[in-house]
C-alpha cells in the first residue's frame, strides 16, 4: 500500500500568504497596479507601449515611434494596430497602420497618424502627445498584406493617409520582390506623407510613382488609370483611401471582371453624422428608443426600462460609465461631442451625456 504524505501547509501557502500580505498593505490597489507603474511593459501585463518619439511628416501628420511591451507578437507588413490613449480623461481606441518594417533589431514599431478635422484622438496624437507617454496596444491585425510568394506585378492605389500600410510594405522590401507602381493622391506636394521617401525610391528605379495633387490636378478618376497605368487591371492591386475612392475602384474592377485582383482597406467604414438627439439602442437590454438632445442618456435608459448603473448623477463619481459601441453623444456640461465606431472602446458618462445622433450603448 502506498501512503501519500501531504506537503506542509506552511510551504504550500508561503507565496499565497505573501501575496495576501501585499494586497493588505496596498489596498485598495493590487500589487499588480504598482508593478504597472514600475514596469508597464513587462511580460504578463496588459499590452502597452511607451512612445519614444513623435516626428512630423507633414503639416497634419506625424509618425509615432513606440517601444511595445514584451508580449508584442510582431506584425506583417500592411497590418494595423489599435492604440488606446487617454484624451481628457477618457480612454479612446483607434486603429492605425504600422509603417515600420517588422522585426526591427530594437523591437520598436511605428505608426503614422494624420490629424483629421474634429478628430479628437488623431489631433491629440499628432499635436499633443509627448515622448514618454504610456499607451495601450492590441496585437496587430488585418489581412491587407502581400501574399507569399509576392505577385510579379503590383499596383498600390492610395490617397491621403491610405499610403501608410503601403509604406509598411515598401519598407519591408515589397519592391524587391515585385514590379511596383504606386499611384497616390494628396491635396498638394507638401501633403504627400512620406513624399521624400517615395520620390527617392522612384529616383532609384525601385518603384514607378504617379503623384496626383488634387488641389491643382483635380480628383483622380478611375477612368484615368488606363492612361496612367495601362496594365492596371492585370496587376494585383492594393487600394487604400477615402470611402468614395474605394467604392469607385471596386465598381471599376468588378465591371472588368477582375475583382479577385483587388484588395482594399477601409479604416473606418462607418460614417458618424452628429446631430441633435436621435435613436438610442441599449444593446444588451434589447431596447431602442428615440431621445432628444437635452435629456441625459441615464434618464432615457431608465424611462425605457433599462437597468442603468448610476451614482451621483452629476458627472462626478463616474458610477454611470458605460461603453459607447457606435454613434455620437454630446456632453451636456460643455457641448463637446464624442463619437465611436465598433471597436473603439469609448466610455461615456450617461448622466451628463445626451444623444447627438443615432447611438448604441452597451448596456
Image (spheres, rainbow, N blue to C red):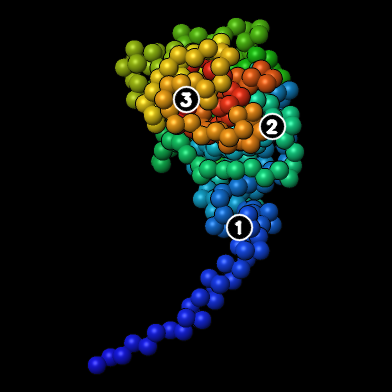
Label ID, residue 302: 3
Up/down of 288 relative to 20, above or below: above
Quadrant for residue 132, please give it.
Answer: top right
Residue projecting furthest to the left: 1
Locate the N terminus and report the quarter of the image it occupies. bottom left
Q: Earlier in the sequence, mark 1 or mark 3?
A: 1
**Residue 80 x/y as whole percent:** 52, 36
Task: Looking at the image, tell me whether mark 1 or mark 2 is earlier in sequence order.
Answer: 1
| Distance between mark 1 and mark 2 Cα atoms | 25 Å
Mark nearer the N terminus (3 vs 2): 2
Quadrant showing the C terminus: top left
Q: Secondary structure at mark 3?
A: helix
Q: Secondary structure under badge 1?
A: loop
| Residue topped by disc 2 | 88
Q: Which residue is mark 1?
A: 30
- Answer above or below: position of 179 versus 32: above
Q: Which mark is residue 224?
A: none
Alpha carbons under labels 1 and 3: distance apart: 34 Å
Amino acid at each position: 500500500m502506498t501512503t501519500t504524505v501531504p506537503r506542509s501547509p506552511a510551504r504550500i501557502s508561503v507565496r499565497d500568504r505573501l501575496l495576501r500580505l501585499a494586497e493588505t498593505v496596498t489596498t485598495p490597489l493590487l500589487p499588480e497596479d504598482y508593478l504597472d507603474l514600475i514596469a508597464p511593459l513587462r511580460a504578463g501585463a496588459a499590452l502597452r507601449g511607451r512612445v519614444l518619439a513623435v516626428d512630423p511628416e507633414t503639416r497634419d501628420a506625424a509618425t509615432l515611434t513606440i517601444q511595445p511591451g514584451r508580449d508584442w507578437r510582431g506584425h506583417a507588413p500592411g497590418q494595423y494596430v489599435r492604440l488606446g490613449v487617454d484624451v481628457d480623461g477618457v480612454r479612446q481606441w483607434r486603429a492605425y497602420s504600422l509603417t515600420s518594417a517588422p522585426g526591427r533589431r530594437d523591437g520598436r514599431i511605428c505608426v503614422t497618424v494624420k490629424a483629421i478635422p474634429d478628430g479628437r484622438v488623431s489631433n491629440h496624437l499628432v499635436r499633443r502627445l509627448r515622448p514618454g507617454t504610456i499607451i495601450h496596444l492590441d496585437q496587430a491585425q488585418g489581412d491587407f498584406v502581400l501574399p507569399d510568394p509576392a505577385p510579379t506585378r503590383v499596383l498600390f492605389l492610395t490617397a491621403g493617409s491610405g499610403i501608410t500600410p503601403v509604406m509598411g510594405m515598401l519598407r519591408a522590401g515589397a519592391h524587391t520582390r515585385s514590379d511596383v507602381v504606386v499611384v497616390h493622391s494628396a491635396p498638394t506636394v507638401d501633403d504627400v506623407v512620406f513624399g521624400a521617401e517615395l520620390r527617392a525610391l522612384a529616383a532609384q528605379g525601385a518603384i514607378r510613382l504617379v503623384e496626383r495633387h488634387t488641389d491643382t490636378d483635380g480628383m483622380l478618376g478611375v477612368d484615368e488609370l488606363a492612361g496612367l497605368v495601362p496594365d492596371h487591371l492585370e496587376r494585383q492591386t492594393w487600394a487604400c483611401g477615402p470611402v468614395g475612392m474605394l467604392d469607385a475602384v471596386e465598381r471599376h474592377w468588378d465591371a472588368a471582371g477582375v475583382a479577385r485582383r483587388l484588395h482594399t482597406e477601409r479604416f473606418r467604414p462607418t460614417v458618424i453624422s452628429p446631430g441633435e438627439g436621435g435613436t438610442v439602442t441599449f444593446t444588451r437590454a434589447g431596447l431602442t428608443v428615440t431621445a432628444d438632445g437635452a435629456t441625459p442618456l441615464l434618464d432615457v435608459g431608465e424611462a425605457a426600462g433599462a437597468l442603468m448603473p448610476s451614482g451621483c448623477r452629476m458627472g462626478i463619481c463616474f458610477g454611470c460609465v458605460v461603453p459607447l459601441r457606435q454613434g455620437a453623444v454630446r456632453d451636456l456640461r460643455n457641448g463637446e461631442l464624442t463619437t465611436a465606431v465598433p471597436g473603439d472602446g469609448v466610455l461615456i458618462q450617461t448622466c451628463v451625456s445626451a444623444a447627438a445622433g443615432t447611438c448604441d450603448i452597451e448596456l
